Image (cartoon, coloured by chain):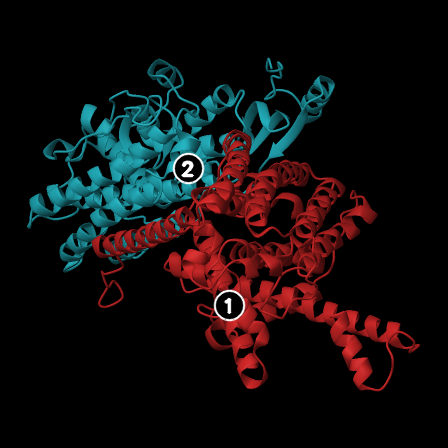
Amino acid sequence: MKPLEIPTMDMTSKEVMRRIEISGDMLLNMGPQHPSTHGVINFLVQTDGEVMKRAIPEVGYLHRSLEKIGERCTYNGYMPYTDRVDYITAMCANQGWAMAVERLLGITVPKRAEYCRTIACELNRISSHLVSAGTMAMDIGAVTPFPYALREREYINDLLEELCGARLTYNYLRIGGVAFDLPSNFEEKLGTFLDHFEKILVEFNRLITYNEIFIKRLAHLAPIPAAMAIDYCLVGPNLRASGVQFDVRKDLPYSVYPEFQFDAPVGKGEVGTVGDSWDRFWCRCEEMRQSCRILRQCLAQIPKEGGTMAKVPRKIKLPEGTEAYSRIESARGDMQYYVIAGAGENAYRVKIRTGSFTAMGIIDVLSRGLMIADLVALIASLDVVAPEIDR
Amino acid sequence: MQAFLDSLIRNAGHDPATWPWTQFVYLAAMGAVSFAVINFAAITAGIFSWAERRVAARMQSRVGPNRVGPGGFLQWVADAVKLLLKEDLVPDEADQFLFRIAPYFMMVGFACVFVCLPFSHRLIVADMNVGIFYILAVTALIVVGIIMSGWSSNSKWSLFGAIRSAAQIISYEIPAGMALMIPVMLAGTLSTQGIIRAQGGWPWQWYVFNNPAALVAFLIYFISALAEGNRTPFDLPEAESELVSGYNTEYSGMRFSYFFLVEWGNMWIMSALASTMFFGGWQIPGLSPEHFDALTGGVAVLAEVASLAIFAFKTLIFVFIVMWLRWTLPRIRVDQMMNMCWKYLVPASFAGVLFVGVWMLIVHAAPWIGLVMRLGLTAAGALGVTLFALRTLKNIRDTGDKFDFTSNW
């Protein structure tokens, strides 16, 4: 059962196939149009019947040169593109860019705008985790949790649509603040939604999280020990599920997060080993509850007065070579933007570091000796989003 | 059936033994009955396809197909027409002959089962004395069709689905067969009508509440039937999130529709078998089969219709449960599926058969034990159903679709 040495990335696919054929195994192309790879990702699966020897992720099918685009357009003009970095949590991707440029300019964002950002990001985090949990349940074969999750996501989309007019790629944040203030009676509606959603979370857990078959499928599946998770640069819920207490919102606080009471749930191995796939699923479910807590505190603490935009020069021009760096906790974990200002109105270099890309790296190691059905569960549990991998 | 035809011929003034056209009458009757049965199978499968989508939609707070006809009822007709008109693609690399012929194997295996399935007191195509044996035998044809389709598609995903399916169906035939042997032992016959006649109309006369082993046998049969019908949680052969669509990935058009026809039609078969073997079939409470036979005229017709309705009602409840399970449960993994079969279901079904053998001796010696056990199990079953209903009501009360987001949202 020793996995065959097939270094692939620098090898033509013909060579890979030839090597696998010599070994007598089957080479299976899982993707790029496979229903459960969550986007256009390809996995070269070397398999002997149901049991896999190795699954090699092949990324790059969704590369849109977003970093290069960032170097070609103005700082403000790049904002809509950041939506596309991770379209499931576009708000967080917005915020990373906004924060990086604000640090370049040395702007302080008004308090009310920070609260608007937090409300938008946390709502978006819930909707992202809903998609993740729903699709994961669907990959395990339970179809019903998916529409349940998406139904709740629709309410969040409705809220965000009222907030900024868009349902998926929001383009809500601006450098120095947010585009629009909260609409009238938005806070009331958000409160109603939270009352409803906290009950739904209990129902959702009863429906799928503690389902016997679901636990049987996911407990002990592909556990990631804490040291390994750190070695492979896992971030966000994937890292926390392995028992590492690290949340950018708590450990490297930004925006108004220090003002809130919330926990970053850590995997405890409740039904299996610490860091197994079920723990990753559970962490996301628990994070939704924590986001609800944050949102409630936002509603209580948001300043009634104060503008939503800081004073920002109409044309942002910066001394060439100034650098800035921002780290935020997106739904998929630590998302980092690194900007070097260029000579004109645009950046010289933009670098985006995302959680999904590093999560893809660990699949090769974890997949050895798993079954094909487990690979699907593993990919889903790491919550990789194709555009975030390739950018 | 033959006796009925003979009496018709006699009424027409011929002797069936010597009349040269007798065989032709038989042939024509066979054709007509086959046509009716296959149509029944196809139409129930079609209606189930609509019903399943509506049930699933209700469970997932969606609407489901509601455009074609009242409540979307004619959706299945529209789908069937669409599938018939679609191009029947055969992949270049496929084994042409096997690829084309595979769906018919499934259809034959599926349609042949209906020969022995009872519908009501008199309505059955042929009440064979090897009925259950025959049903178990012909359903095995389905697995041949599945393997053929998976292999001939020349697609790795299809092959995966086919091999999974073969392993699954062959494994689960053993516990299913052993579990069905328990009613056969109790009734002393393999004939489906005979087994129904040996039961009664009231719940405590059903075999499911006859003794603990029979109750377990029913559960084993139901689980195995789910597995044989490729229904969730055993839908591994067509696990859409793993294998794209399993053995039918490469099919399109009418051949594709055959696979689905068989899948949905199988729901009727498994449910009808469950109500035949364990739930008293068409028996009307308070009317013994002997009295039923003796009825004549309008009352007989009325009783016949009532028995048909009772049988259909019981069967449709099981069909609903199968749908319900499908839209609630996740799928289990291949090794777990095999473990469950060989480690738990097969030994349990063998133990059940032994237990029933001993039990029959005990009841033969002291009939009151059997009566007490039947009544006790019926009460326990009723209690279980009541508790389940209460629990469901509580869950609905705790978190139901109460919040009205449509108004002013």
> Circle 1 marks a residue in which chain?
B
The answer to whether the residues at label 1 and label 2 have Cβ atoms under 8 Å apart is: no
Residue B354 in picture, x, y percent from top left: 53, 36
The residue at 68%/36% (across/down) is B156
Q: Position of residue A268 (x, y in %)?
A: 27, 24
**Residue A136: where, in percent of width, then height?**
42, 39
The quadrant where residue B357 appears = top right
Same chain for marks 1 and 2?
no
**Which secondary structure lies at badge 1?**
loop
Which of discs 1 and 2 lies nearer the camera? The answer is 1
Q: Is A338 above or below relative to A72?
A: above
Residue closer to the observer: B368 or B72: B368
- The quarter of the rendered structure image containing the N terminus of chain A is top right
Which residue in the structure is indicated by mark 2?
A213
Residue B310 visible? The answer is: yes
Number of residue marks: 2
What type is the residue that disc 1 sits on? Ser
The hue used for chain B is: red
At x 43%, y 43%, the residue is B212
Question: Badge 2: few (under 14), some or many (20 or more) residues near its Cα, within 10 Å?
Answer: many
Q: CA distance from mark 1 to mark 2?
A: 43 Å
The residue labelled by disc 1 is: B288
- Residue A240 versus residue B395 in the image, above or below: above
